[in-house]
């Protein structure tokens, strides 16, 4: 395989399917893209349309922008703080900063998460079921419920898991929390 965008997309699409443990038939059923088209895409015989990429991303629970970031050529070794995307919830004290974003050739990303006192976050289903997570608590106390199992973590604690179902995060105490989240793909 060469090093064109089509080649890199082909490799990434094949790797994503393999990571899920799906056959071409299973992905075809989930995405609505024919098995034959998927095979041709994964072998870089054709370039995918935006519609096909959107269907495949939906099947994998992955934003199209993230897929494209994963196939960009190379990555910069240094990510200046000014280039680290931040997201703030307009309705509650929640801030996430992607300190080390996903990139082609890297297997994960790092986020800094800050939640104010009393914050409760519910995630009914993960975007990528089975994705590996490592939460390193830097400040405060947090109760994390994964499926039906509850963990309380505080300064210096690490919580490691594969996110396969719902997750609830509850800030304990009156300080709020700050933690680093390492996610692999």
Image (spheres, rainbow, N blue to C red):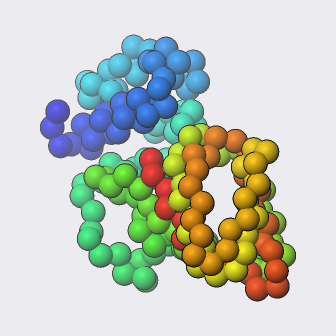
Total numbered labels placed on residues in the image: 0
Q: Is residue 112 visible?
A: yes
Q: Residue at x 55, y 26 (%)?
A: 31
8 or 182: nearer the viewer: 182
- 114 vs 9: above or below: below
User: Which quadrant would residue 4 be assigned to in this image?
Assistant: top left
Q: Is residue 96 visible?
A: no
The quadrant of the rendering that contains the N terminus is: top left
Is residue 45 shown left or right of residue 14? left
User: How far across and down, in percent of the image, does residue 81 sit?
Assistant: 42, 82
- 47 vs 30: above or below: below
Q: Residue at x 80, y 74 (%)?
A: 172
12 or 153: nearer the viewer: 153
Q: Residue at x 53, y 45 (%)?
A: 131
User: How far across and down, in percent of the image, does residue 76 sit?
Assistant: 27, 69
- 175 vs 13: above or below: below
User: How far across and down, in percent of the image, does residue 173 sit?
Assistant: 82, 80
User: How far across and down, in percent of the image, does residue 133 sit?
Assistant: 54, 54
Is residue 91 shown left or right of residue 138? right
Q: Residue at x 47, y 66 (%)?
A: 110
């Amino acid at each position: 395989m060469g090093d064109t965008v089509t080649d890199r997309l082909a490799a990434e699409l094949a790797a994503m399917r393999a990571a899920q443990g799906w056959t071409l038939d299973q992905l075809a059923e989930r995405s609505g893209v024919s098995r034959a088209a998927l095979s041709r895409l994964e072998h870089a015989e054709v370039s995918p349309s935006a519609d096909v990429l959107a269907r495949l991303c939906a099947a994998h629970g992955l934003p199209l922008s993230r897929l494209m970031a994963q196939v960009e050529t190379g990555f910069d070794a240094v990510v200046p703080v000014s280039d680290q995307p931040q997201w703030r919830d307009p309705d509650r004290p929640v801030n996430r900063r992607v300190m080390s974003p996903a990139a082609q050739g890297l297997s994960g990303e790092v986020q800094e998460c800050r939640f104010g006192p009393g914050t409760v976050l519910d995630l009914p289903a993960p975007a990528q079921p089975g994705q590996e997570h490592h939460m390193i608590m830097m400040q405060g106390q947090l109760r994390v419920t994964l499926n039906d199992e509850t963990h309380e973590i505080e300064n210096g604690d690490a919580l490691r898991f594969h996110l396969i179902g719902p997750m609830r995060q509850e800030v304990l105490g009156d300080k709020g929390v700050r933690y680093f989240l390492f996610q692999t793909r």
